[in-house]
Each structure stands twice: as structure tokens, then as C-alpha cells.
Amino acid sequence: MGVLTQEQHLQFETEGYLLTSGLIPDDISERAEKVMWRLMEMDPSDPATWEHKPDLAAQFQPMSGLSVLNGIQDPDIMSCVTSEYLKATADLLGEESVHPPESAHMQNKVPIETQWSLPKAHIDGLPKEHMHKTFPGPYRIASLVFLNDIDHKGGGTAVFPGSHRKIMELAKSDVKKYEYIISLNRDLPTLDLGEAVELTPRRGDVLFFTYCFGHIGTANVGNTPRWMVRYMCSCKSCQTKWPKTDKWGLWTP
């Protein structure tokens, strides 16, 4: 028996994304949130501690408030990979099961002072050093796990419902021109992808989206950091499809 409703399956198919609750129990996500504060070396009650570069950060962008951590294998972070989470992933792919990830990739944003707006869409798979080909693409489905409550203008993801269909139509219109995802992404402004929808996930929510789905992270001008996890794997398939570091690829079930 699946863990998602028919309505959720239909939304994912038609709109290209699904934000869902209940796959990660509250006690598990609560422990993971506490671990995230520790990994980031920050005190939730002291905003002065939010401004430094964490020792574990592989990337740090003070202007955007972004810290990126790779290959984190803390047990409480990995416990968010519940059987329900894996089952939902498999169901959306039409598979019986998927292999579990082995570590976590984190993109955390602390609050910054800037004018907030909904940015333009992008699609995943852009790093020039890897030059991912559009077909068949480096992934079939992606999922983001949020480990704290995110309010309006707090760094939530903006999505463009149904954009995957228009983007795939563009890709197929000239497969030579759009051989690489980076070339396809460059021409997204030529498409009318509709109005962006700002998502405000709660702790433990999972955002699934399909290949070539238009989305973008927004600035965090709120009053608390945004904690977000995307999982990684060292298996040959994941490392080949979507390499991220020397050891880890993004999890691509």
C-alpha cells in the first residue's frame, strides 16, 4: 500500500512537484533540527552566532547567507530517511523500491538584509564542470527535506507549477542546441512559466520535484535560519549520474 494519496500523485504528475507532510515523524525532525544547529555551530537564541562560516562548510556565501555542507552522516540527520520517505520516492517514480542514500548535502541560509522578491526559475544540473546532458538527464526525481518551519520570505523554495512540461517541450524542439542542461537553462526566460509560488514548508516536510522542473531558492529575510537537506550517495550509479564531490554524488534513485 502506498503512502501517498491519488490526489498527491495527480498533483505531482500535472504540476511537477509535491510538498508533503507526515513522511518524517515530529520527534525525528526535531532531533535533526537540533543537530543542524550544532553542525552549523550556531545558537538559536543568539543571532550574532549566525554570521560566521561553519567549520564544516564546503561553500560559504556571506552575501546570500548560504552555507553548503557535503557528506554529513550524522545519525539524526540520516534518520529522516524513513521508510515512508523512501516509499513515497519509489511510488512517485513508479518503482517498487529505491536504494537509500548514505549522507547529506545541506544548503542552509541565514537571514540577510536585502530587498525580497520572487526570482526567475532555474532547473537543476547546471555546474559547468560536469556539463550534464539534457537527455536522459542526471536525475528523475529530486527531494528536499526541510528541518525547521519556514515562513513567508524566510528562504522557502519558489516553484513554477507545470513548468516541466513547457521546459521539456523546449528541450525537444532542438535537441542539438539543448544537448546540455546549461544551454536549456539559459533559454528559460523565453518561456512563459506562469507565476511563481512561494512555498513555506514546516519542519519535516519533503518537497519532491520532477526532472526539468522550474524552481528557485528565495532570499531569507526572516528572523531565523533556513535548514534544508538533500541527500547524497557514493554508489557508482549516483556518482556517475550526478557527481558532487570526489566521494559523493547527489542521490539519484
Image (cartoon, helix red, strand yellow):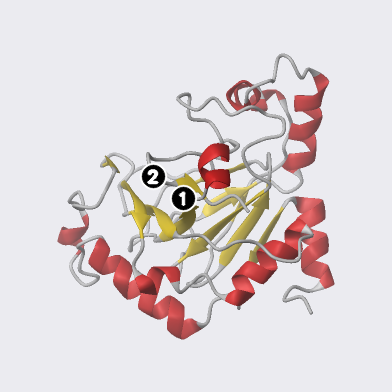
- Residues at marks 1 and 2 touching, judged by CB atoms closer than 8 Å: yes
Q: What residue sits 73% from the left and 14% below the top?
A: 176
Quadrant hosting residue 47: bottom left
| Image coordinates for residue 104, horizontal then vertical, percent | 42, 57
Q: Is 86 located above or below residue 116 in the figure?
A: below
Question: Is residue 203 depicted above or below 67 in this figure?
Answer: below
Q: At 71% from the left edge and 14% from the top edge, which residue is drawn?
A: 177
The residue lying toward the viewer, choosing from 180 and 240, is 240
Taking depth in this image into account, of 246 and 132 the one nearest to the observer is 246
Q: Nearer the viewer, residue 41 or 72?
A: 72
What secondary structure is found at the residue carrying circle 1? loop
Disc on res. 234: 1
Q: Position of residue 138 (x, y in %)?
A: 62, 38
**Dot 2 alpha-carbon crowd within 10 angstroms: few under 14, some 14 to 19, many 20 or more:** few
Tag 1: amino acid: Ser
Residue under the point 76% across and 52% down: 15
Q: Tag 2's secondary structure? A: loop
Query: Residue drawn 51% across and 63% down?
Result: 145
Mark 1–mark 2 distance (CA, rounded to whole Å): 6 Å
Q: Which residue is labeled 2 in the image?
A: 247
Picture disc at residue 153: none
Q: Position of residue 228 (x, y in %)?
A: 44, 59
Residue positioned most to the top:
177
Rendered view: 82 above or below 129: below
The residue sitting at the bottom extreme is: 27
Q: Residue 27: image x %, image y %?
A: 44, 85
**Residue 90 visible in this rendered orientation of the protein:** yes
The residue positioned farthest toward the front in the image shown: 236
Quadrant assignment for the N terminus: bottom right
Residue 218 visible, this orientation: no
Task: Locate the C terminus and report the quarter of the image it occupies.
Answer: bottom right
